[in-house]
Image (tube, rainbow, N blue to C red):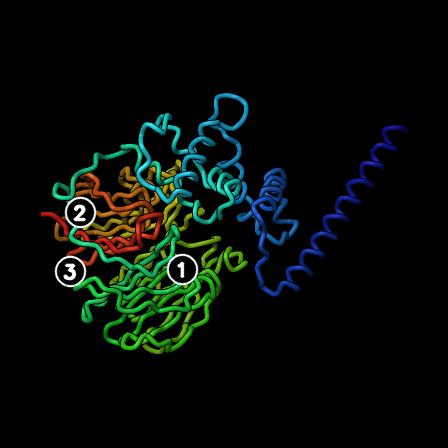
Amino acid sequence: MVQLLLLLFGGWVNRRQLDVIEYLQEENRILTARLGGRRLRFTDTERRLLARRARALGRQLIGALETLVTPDTLLRWHRELIALNWNCSHRRGVGRSRVMHAIADLLVRKATEKTLIPIPRSQLTVEATHMNHLTENHLTERAGHAGMGGRLFNATAVLLACCLSLGAPQVSAADGPLVLEKSMTMPAVPPGPYSDYLSIDLVGNRIFATPQAAKAVAVLDLKDGHVLKMIPGIGNPHGIFYSPTLKRLFVADGASGDVKVFSGEDYSLIKTIPLARGADWLVYDPHSQFIYVNNGGEDAGMDHALISAVDTVRMEKVADIPIATPGLEASVIDSGKQLLYVNLIDESAVAVVDLSKRQTVGTWKLPAGGHPNLAIALDTAHARLYVACRDSAMQGSIIVLDTTNGRPVATLPIGGWADGIFVDQKRQRIYVSTGVGHIETYTIAATDVYRRQATVDTAVMAKTSLYSSELDRMYVSVPHLGATMAQILIFKPSP
């Protein structure tokens, strides 16, 4: 009799749980409809709370609940905000390592004094192996106590690589594979840790830069280095392309979610092409005269990202290619095959998109071990993709993929925070710009043999770059940090 009562009671509890779940599902559907595609903004504290609960429930049950946030996003929050930043799995004892607080305090103090670099080695009494565990949260927490904004410290951990001789040996300006030829300063750019992509006008001898702190595009004369114009009114400039034949400048604005088209003659705004929020990287296809722009995804409150095809002649969006991922990073086009290769950072994979069919035709996983892939370059002569990854704050890797089958054939170590990678076919080299203040160079030999060359110094957070084969120069964008003004460094390959 008692067993029967227990069974009945258990069945009633289970039914009540199902009723609760069904109610929550219906409530979430209504809330989602009321939001109308708008994105809910969560604080880091709220993300951590949801991430912990989501991790305990598991992907399948989260999906059944039809939550406002997708299961992939919830589990990624757990991976980023808890598993990596807060479990301190590397520690030997109880509590977070004191060394992390000491380093964060030192960086905040140096930033406050506007002496970001160099920090004397004697002040860093810690082994280099500890550096990988200094995270954004350590720095922003300390910055908050110091009464300073946390945004500036999102990338400050990379400063440590300038204090310690990690990785490949550094060289003087005259000895390396690249020699600093000159720099071009952008004095109107306010302090800020990020400067994004570059584009060159070969006919007009101009270079276009995207210093994000200025919320503008900087136009510089390549001959004398002077700033010709600061094009304002761009909330968060990212991808950029200049068409010399059309005399138009295309800029992806992540803040407003669109592509802004400016005149290449008087810099006036010609047209705004609406996209989803989070418009970022773009790449040009000379075959179709389309630019393909990354947008949508988590930044837009969507459960998938988009690659939007924009006709540069008609200045219109002609198609959206959906990609099942929270966000996209850099892409590259094989114009002859009409294939686009795009980085899926959350999956540590590369998606292969058929531009004729406008659909994904393959996904190539990177080797195990955690390789968040940011930058990508195509070497059609060797049928290779070079994928630059940020394995930690100060260490990264280039994953070499065979484009005939997507298989990895080599893993090459580089510095951290890579965001620009290019192939110099003339010298058979790979150049990678990193946020730890170096350009990495590898020579390409037969049968997938790659030889690392000495690193060349740039500046802290100078992670974006552009190599022009026509001008045979490497251009590196430097943000305004401390006493270092925003500028573009120009390097000449040697020999």
Of labels 1 and 2, earlier in sequence is 1
Which quadrant would residue 243 be assigned to in this image?
A: bottom left
The N terminus appears in which quarter of the rendering?
A: top right
Q: Is residue 314 above or below residue 89?
A: below
SS class, disc 3: loop
- Give, as a three-letter code, the residue at label 2: Arg
Which numbered circle lies on residue 280?
1
Q: Residue furthest right?
A: 1
Q: Nearer the viewer, mark 1 or mark 2?
A: 1
Which numbered circle lies on residue 429?
2
Q: Is residue 55 left or right of residue 104?
A: right
Nearer-the-camera pick, 403 or 160: 160
SS class, disc 1: loop
Distance between the alpha carbons at the discs numbered 2 and 3: 16 Å
Q: Residue at x 17, y 38 (%)?
A: 171
Distance between the alpha carbons at the discs numbered 1 and 2: 27 Å
Which numbered circle lies on residue 471?
3
Q: Residue 486, image x and y in percent? A: 31, 55
Distance between the alpha carbons at the discs numbered 3 and 1: 26 Å
Q: Is residue 146 left or right of residue 268?
A: right
